[in-house]
Image (cartoon, rainbow, N blue to C red):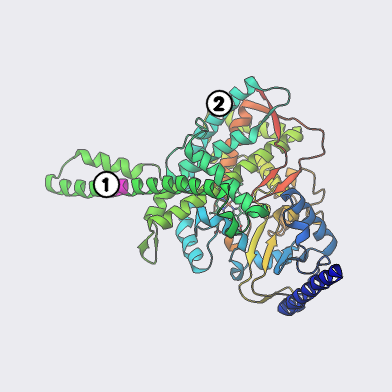
Amino acid sequence: MFLTLSLLAIATVLTVAALIYKLRFKYLIDVTRDIPSAPTLPIIGHAHYFVNKPPRVQIQKLNELLEIYGNTMKVWLGTELNVIMGDVQDVEAVLGSMTFIEKAGEYKRLEPWLKEGLLVSGGRKWHKRRKAITPAFHFKILDQFIEVFERESRALVANLERECRLQSNSGFNLYDWINLCTLDTICETAMGVSVHAQTNTDSEYVQAVKTISTVIHKRMFDILYRFDLTYRFTKLARAEKRALSVLHGFTERIIMQRRAELLRAQENTLNAAADKNSTNGYNATDNDADVGAKRKQAFLDILLHAEIDGKPLSNLDIREEVDTLMFEGHDTTSSAITFFFYNIATYPECQRKCYAEIVDIFGKDTSKPVTYEALNGLTYVELCIKETLRLFPSVPLLGRKVTQECEINGKVLPAGTNIGISPLYLGRQESIFPDANIFKPERFDISNDAKKMNPYAYIPFSAGPRNCIGQRFAMLEVKSIVTNVLRHFEVEFVSDGTEGPTLIAELILRTKDPLMFRLKPRI
Ligand code: HEM
């Protein structure tokens, strides 16, 4: 009797909940009826496929569902409506438009570190910042960073030479070394200072970057850490607080130092001009001021000079943007470089061609530094980088939020819908890229089919107004690093016998197990 009553009570509660749910979400369900989806479970929708599943399983499931239910489909996570787009026309309508520039809710996970920096912000704030920051990526600025790419990639080669002497048959994890190199590079180009990550892996700043990356991933993918109410009592939350204080403290100190240096340089210039007028002759401060003016500019210096609505950016504004560059500018490139080596090692003919091109341009003298012009001449290496980013896009999933109900190619998207777009899924579409799973750099050769390709089908740097502001920087950095490594070593992939690496589509694409390499010094 008690059991029957209990079952009845549970059934009633579930029915009432289902009814409320139906009524509340009837509108959403009705207007999106024409968008296909897998069958849903009451209340949770499709959450059972994704919530608390490892990212490796989530991406597999998403791709499976897209294959079955069409290139644009709905995914209900409880009451949250997500539309996943794999149809190039739909992708173009979203990425190509200024209507869809707001980021999806998941980007909030980045806010503790990046606050409202360019990657996360939306609306007018994003628009004005983007305009103010764009000059920082002018080729004249990028040109002066080549010297940093050169220096840091040579430090990487030195580390790899040591690793090479110690390596066993099972090889070693190249990613870790590359990641330290790209961290040093972005730190120096963004802030004008070095954290010496490659020589001091224990540095507080380096450790804090690692901690915060772990926190972001765990908060996105592990249900234990998703809810603010319970998260704040966890050990991870305490580690996050400590790491944030290190990261923000470091950036703030550098901003204040640089602001003070600039002020001093300006005062020196003014004093020098005044002295010149009074003495009408040479003065030692001429030289000092010159040195200040000619010093290599970091992104930070450009931000210190930038204005929005006629006002300079505050220290906090600048910190948001410098931190954003630090975050967006190092894991992305290390993922691309590691997959580049994986590809050319598994396709040795491509490695041979890359090396031949490098020797053709730089000769065999490994001490000859890379230059902007020489890097631009590396056309085959560039094809290999592009093909790597098709198969292994560093950012495997992009998200947008619909702010006002709209229609895209006949599909109604209600306000509040999250849109998901997967460069990884698009890059492996057989209909767009024949032999999609094969590494074929020539497909990007403009004398071939590349001309006909819809630019929204190949989107490792996203596309449209919110595309990657750092893509030319990234290309130059990746080319510098792979050039200097390939000048010194032949790269071999140590296969674990499986068909290919198991991909994990976290914020940045990675593999379930580290990719292991052996290096053979070139004689
Ligand atoms: C291979 C390397 C890289 C790849 C594949 C890549 C890819 C991307 C993608 C896909 C986006 C759009 C993200 C989204 O909509 O959620 C993006 C945005 C961005 N990237 Fe990159 N990125 C790379 C390197 C860099 C570097 C080196 C920098 C800085 C030096 C950078 C700075 C940014 C910034 C600031 C944004 C936000 C732009 C905005 O919303 O206006 N990225 N990147």
Give 300 or 463, whichever is nearer the viewer.
300
Q: Is residue 30 left or right of residue 181?
A: right
Query: Closer to the N terminus: mark 1 or mark 2?
Result: 2
The question of residue 463 being in magenta is answered with no
At x 80%, y 73%, the residue is 9
The question of residue 263 being in magenta is answered with yes
Magenta region, residue range: 260-265
Q: Is residue 425 left or right of residue 317?
A: right
The vertical placement of 417 against 266, above or below, is below
* Local crowd size for mark 2, using a 10 Å CA cut-off: few (<14), some (14–19), many (≥20): some
Q: Which mark is residue 8?
A: none
Q: Amino acid at mark 1?
A: Arg
Q: Amino acid at mark 2?
A: Ala
At x 67%, y 50%, the residue is 506
Q: Which residue is mark 2?
A: 158
Which quadrant, please, contains the N terminus?
A: bottom right
Q: Which mark is residue 264?
A: 1
Numbered label tally = 2
Q: Is residue 375 visible?
A: yes
Q: Main secondary structure of the magenta part?
A: helix
Circle 1 sits in a helix, a strand or a loop, which is it?
Answer: helix
Q: Is residue 460 visible?
A: no
Q: Position of residue 520 (x, y in %)?
A: 68, 23
